[in-house]
Image (tube, helix red, strand yellow):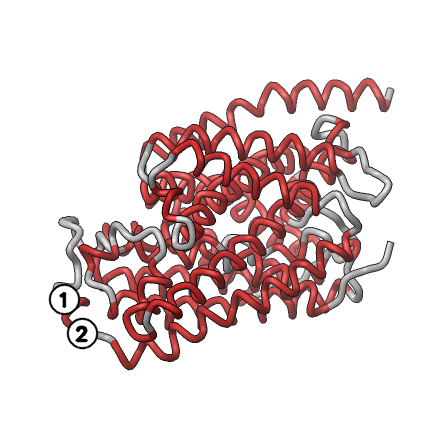
Amino acid sequence: MSKIGFWSSTSLVVGNMIGSGVFLLPASLAAFGGISIIGWIASSMGALLLAIVFGRLGRLAPQTTGGPFAYTRIGLGDFPAFVVAWGYWISIWCTNAAIAVAFVGYLEVFLPILGQSRLLSIFTGLGVIWLFTWINSKPLQTVALVQLITTTLKVLPIFMVGLIGVFYINVDFFTPLNISGTSNFQAITATTTLTLFAFLGMESASIPSENTKNASSTIRLATLTGTMVAIILYIFSSIAIMGIIPPETLAVSSAPFADAAEIFWGDIAKYIIAGGALVATLGALNGWILIQGQIPMAAAHQNLFPRIFGKLNQNDSPFIGIVLSSLLASFLMMLNYSKSLVDAFTFMMKLSTLSVLTPYLFSTMSMMLIYKRQDQLTAGKIALTVLTLLFCLWVIYGCGWETVLWGMGLLILGTPFYLKFRNEKVLHRS
């Protein structure tokens, strides 16, 4: 199998991060006011810490597949690795459901009937999920090329709105700073939790590590480069959006970037930006559907997931596992269409963020343990570990009890499967 290089790895990182999150998040954040910018800065710092962690893990264990799963298995063993694979897998199909919802929201700019017909919206969301499920049955190089093209196209509208939008900012829209009715700490915690969703995927370069050229250096550089690009684009574009659209209008917008562009460029710009947002969500969906096959495949190869997830088609794609994951994403998307678009997106965003925090926590602890075994643990590495763990715990707190209970329930559901796989593994060895 031909391997992917730095640009494809970086586009996987940027493409998986810059998707539905940044394009629909301004609407979710509008209820908090200008204080959400502080949340963006806090989540950016946390994402940078995690990017450093995954960059170092990529150097410590370059010839692996599964990223957080593989690192956790090396550092902590089989059960934590299973919990990571299970939680990460849940996070991915939750993410894909949220992306499909955001895609429908931006397509509504071109097809207003989608806002009037819930059934048509559902079928449109399902259609885009299954289109990219089919694309991911093709060779990895084809998937990587699609990702590189969509990532290049998606960055342009975000960059333009951020660059031009700053000249149209109305500072009155940022005051009062906190309009949420909660304390400043609670508002910052909530907005940090919401905005971290937009950074999920900074670890993407580490997942197909075994199929990456010069993995030990490429993963680290691609992870840090991709995360920095996302931070710059996110913060500047979010400030512009919040300063252009009044909070009460922004809170109910299904396409905030397009609405902002219409204000300073007119109707044509609205359609151009909405088109860019559609490309962004499609690129993110492409990248995450790739990942939703890779993680279960890596776990299946270690007898920690059903063997069917490890089966490959003629293009070396774990297509059956991808299809099963897409079925779950489709079900979750349909289930949440009983809520408003913004409410459905916000719920799936929180559930996805919570589910991926377990892999982040375990990967960070694994990094410290691997360094310790190699007698390379220094004060700087301990500080990195402690700060990253504290950040992850803070975000878990910010998810709220409803989301935490959902996440715990989904993780508990996985325990019987682990016991079954472990027994099969013991019998296989004997």
Which structural element holds mark 1? loop
Question: Residue 376 appears in which quarter of the rendering?
Answer: bottom right
The answer to whether residue 32 of the structure is visible from this angle is: yes
**Residue 95's x, y, as percent?**
50, 43
Q: Is residue 189 left or right of residue 174?
A: right
Q: Point out residue 249 in the picture as x, y percentages from the top left corner.
A: 21, 56
Q: Which mark is residue 175?
A: 1
Name the residue located 71 percent from the left edge and 54 percent from the top edge: 143
The residue that appears at 87% across and 19% down in the rendered structure is: 430
Q: Which residue is mark 2?
A: 171
Viewer-closest of 32 and 157 = 157
Circle 1/circle 2 CB separation < 8 Å: yes
Tag 2: amino acid: Val
Q: Position of residue 187 (x, y in %)?
A: 23, 53
Amino acid type at image mark 1: Thr
Q: Residues within 10 Å of mark 1 (few under 14, many from 20)?
A: few
Q: Quadrant of the N terminus?
A: bottom right
Residue at 42% across, 54% down: 110
Labels in figure, total: 2
Asked if 293 appears above or below 271 in the picture, the reply is: above
Residue 72 visible in image = no
- Mark 1–mark 2 Cα distance, whole angstroms, equals 7 Å
* Outermost residue to the bottom: 167
Using the image, tell me which numbered label, if any, was put on residue 192. none
